[in-house]
Amino acid sequence: MVSINWCLKAKNGLELVGPNKNMADAYLKMAEESLKAIKNNSESKIWTASTAYYTMYYSLYAVMIRIGVKCEVHKCSIEFMKRFLLEFYSKDDVKLVESAFESRNDLQYYPNRLINQNKLEFVREGAVDFFVKTKRVLIKINEKQINEIRNKLREFVK
């Protein structure tokens, strides 16, 4: 089980860095490119799952970098979302990202596992909504909210 405390101690886990709007914009651009790739890979389950997941992951990471949180462990980024971003994302959004992570992981690392086509379609469609929601989050988030999140994370560092 991944926890915030574990993620703060893990190599390449959660780390406070300076908030960076330019990098956030760059990750959002990567999310948009992944979103476009979903259409090109509609016949491939593995690439549909991967591009849908990375659309969501890069979107999430754009918000994290905007706040000033760096993380290379995907499960830790999702845990950060659960703990610190529910003001912007719903629990259903968290479930969507987790489902996308599992689908991509299953198809990439366990080629014999069957993936439910409905789950894959749910993830594909959800990627678009998640991207749009993230664009709104990045427009609306303000310095006060950013500082509140950073301060909450700092409490775990102590």
Image: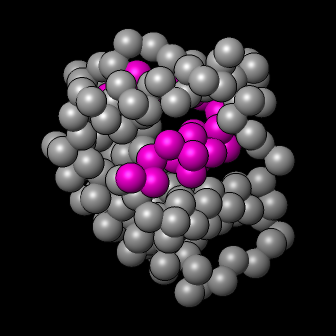
Nearer the observer, 144 or 27:
144
Q: Is residue 78 magenta?
A: yes
Q: Quadrant of residue 35?
A: bottom left
Up/down of 35 relative to 66, above or below: below
With 121 as the anchor, is 18 left or right in this view?
A: left
Counting from the top left corner in percent of width and height, residue 55 is at 40, 52
Counting from the top left corner in percent of width and height, residue 90 is at 44, 64
Nearer the observer, 49 or 119:
119
Task: Please indicate, yes or no, whether residue 49 appears anywhere in the rendered image.
Answer: no
Residue that lies at the very extreme toward the left in this rendered image: 139
User: Which quadrant, please, contains the C terminus?
Assistant: top right
The residue that appears at 48% across and 80% down in the rendered structure is 121
Counting from the top left corner in percent of width and height, residue 126 is at 41, 70
The residue that appears at 75% across and 23% down in the rendered structure is 10
Q: Quadrant of residue 98?
A: bottom right
With 110 as the anchor, is 149 left or right in this view?
A: left
Up/down of 68 relative to 31, above or below: above
Give the residues drawn in magenta, as a range. Answer: 65-87
